[in-house]
Image (cartoon, grey):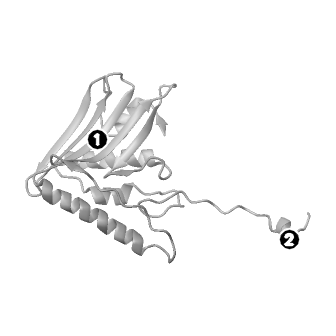
Amino acid sequence: MRVPLPKLLERLGVRGILAPYEAAPWLVYDEDKGITCSAEVRMAGSGTDLEGEIQFLYDDEEAAQEASLKEAQEARAKALSALPPGAPPPPPMPVMKIVNGRAQIFIMRARVAADDAWEVKGLVIKAFDYENDFHDWEGKGCDFFLACVQALQMGEIPDIDALIDSNMQDSSGGGSGRRGRVGRKSPKANPASIMGMKK
């Protein structure tokens, strides 16, 4: 995905252009859940690097750590149960780290290219690296971030897992599920050539 800066910022929910060192922040606190969610798009001082980030700040860090570990264990158990017999086990699921009550939910980095178009160069959501994981991972990452920003603008904490399920999937037709890979089409064969016949 190579797009002009205004288009990239628009896809991330930012109005206008960010100057060097400038940021567009959003913040919501939910007392019932004990979570503060902050989202930010920021331009580096060079004006050639851009980051989008979402963080959760938990009132109860210990409970959040336990929930994160349990979630990773459940995801691995689900992946193992879906494997065909004899298939190798998947790698361990990443566990989202919570440090001083903060968890980085989302980080995306983009850089300007030689032709002044901008390219997304990295994307991690809940400790999972989506870079090149499926077709249009960059666009899907922008859609995910925008959906989070829209929830924050309505005063709500975004439902991260639901947004991962609805946004971070391969829709090219060849992948499956959250970590779907781009499928390969079967080669088209001419039946006459298979049978050794000539026209």
| Quadrant of the rendered image containing residue 77 | bottom left
Q: Residue at x 31, y 28 (%)?
A: 43
Amino acid residing under circle 2 = Met
Determine the secondary structure under disc 2: loop
Q: Where residue 152 sits: x, y (%)?
A: 20, 47
Label 2 Cα crowd, 10 Å radius (few <14 / some 14-19 / many 20+): few
Determine the secondary structure under disc 1: strand
Q: Where residue 93 sits: x, y (%)?
A: 36, 60
Left or right: residue 91 versus residue 66 is right
Q: Residue at x 25, y 61 (%)?
A: 69
Quarter of the rendering occupied by the C terminus = bottom right
Q: Which residue is mark 1?
A: 53
State yes or no: discs 1 and 2 in contact (Cβ < 8 Å). no
**Residue 195 numbered tag:** 2
Q: Where residue 99 sits: x, y (%)?
A: 19, 47
Q: Where residue 38 sits: x, y (%)?
A: 20, 43
| Quadrant of the rendered image containing residue 45 | top left
Amino acid residing under circle 1 = Glu
